[in-house]
Image (cartoon, helix red, strand yellow):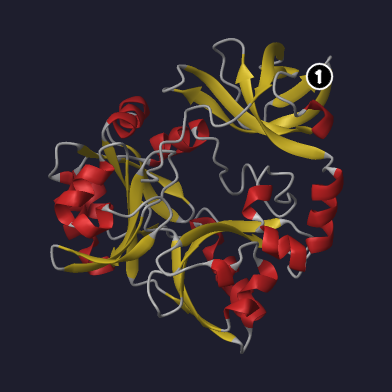
Amino acid sequence: MADTPLHRTPLYDLHVELGAKMVPFAGYEMPVQYDGVMPEHNHTRTHAGLFDVSHMGQARLTGDEAALEAVITADLAALGAGEQKYSLLLNDKGGIKDDFMVSRPDDKGLFLVVNAACKRGDFDYIAATIADRATLTEMPERALLALQGPDAGAVMAEHAPEAAKMVFMQAGWFEIAGMDVMVSRSGYTGEDGFEISVAKHEAEKLARLLLKDDRVKPIGLGARDSLRLEAGLCLYGHDMDETITPVEAALTWAVAKSRRERANFAGADVILDQIANKPEKKRVGIQPKDRAPAREGTEIAVDGKVVGVVTSGGFGPTVGAPVAMGYVPTEFASPGTALELIVRGKARAAEVVKTPFAPHRFYRG
């Protein structure tokens, strides 16, 4: 509803102080840009960007973890101490209710981070699923920052040397300037980096500390979107939703092989059939042949017949050209397949390409 008051993260005043342009996003007032999407994107690719992602949902799950496995794709028994996994929350038809991160940063249970727009529904769905077998404890008292870019490791080493020793998809508790923080070596830009969970009342202190470093600049939602698009990463509600399965979304890798063997998760019959026999449609990377960006909603055609739609698209600053993702029938999903994008009523040449558009640079040691 347009008249529903927007929430603010603990960093709202700092965003305004830094000159951010604030916009509504997932029920919050969030910074879309400070100095411009292009320079912010490029700074993250060359140095380090600091993102406020405090609008996302954080929670703890304790008790019988197998109860959660009924509606997710990860194998929690295989999640070791200090490890994190990307997983999918499923409905009973195998559709994706959300994508999220799950980690085991200590011996006190699982740590979940879900998308902002979905968190209320996610937490209610999870709580109903686990019933009395496990306990979900929401953590609205915590904020979340993301430090991303090739200099992120060096910056972190100055504040939490042990955290900087982690490799991609590890997580744990550390101390930064007297603050207890849960840090994971992960992010959603395709770059090396960290996500840092911190108490709300200490979020501004942490942000100001990191921003004192000349290598670090504040980055808004605009560059976050262009960075994740170049990295070929899905945005929930755009590139996937409850009508899309992991196989259709080209996220089959997120369905653990052990879970496929046990077939004991929501929508397993649908998902396993698609793995065995291929889905009718599939998410693909798309490279326009000219300079006209194909935005979300652009129709995709083959030989003049509309066969699909773009779900994410725009100009890729690192690539130096437009990039897009969308869904096409599986018969047209092979790299090199010629497509047409209907941009402003005109058919423009494009082709299916492998993602990511810009190479991932996660730190693996």
Camera-side residue: 9 or 253?
A: 253
Residue corresponding to mark 1: 302
Camera-side residue: 17 or 184?
A: 184
Does residue 204 appear left or right of residue 255 in this picture? left
User: x%, y% of residue 267?
Assistant: 78, 62
The residue at 65%/47% (across/down) is 251
- Secondary structure beneath disc 1? strand
Residue 266 visible (yes or no): no
Does residue 271 appear left or right of residue 354 in this picture? right
Give the amino acid type for the residue marked by disc 1 in the picture.
Val
The residue at 63%/78% (across/down) is 66
Q: Is residue 44 above or below residue 208?
A: above
User: x%, y% of residue 215?
Assistant: 19, 36
The residue at 42%/23% (across/down) is 318
Residue 252 visible (yes or no): yes
Disc 1 packing (10 Å; few <14; some 14–19; many ≥20): some
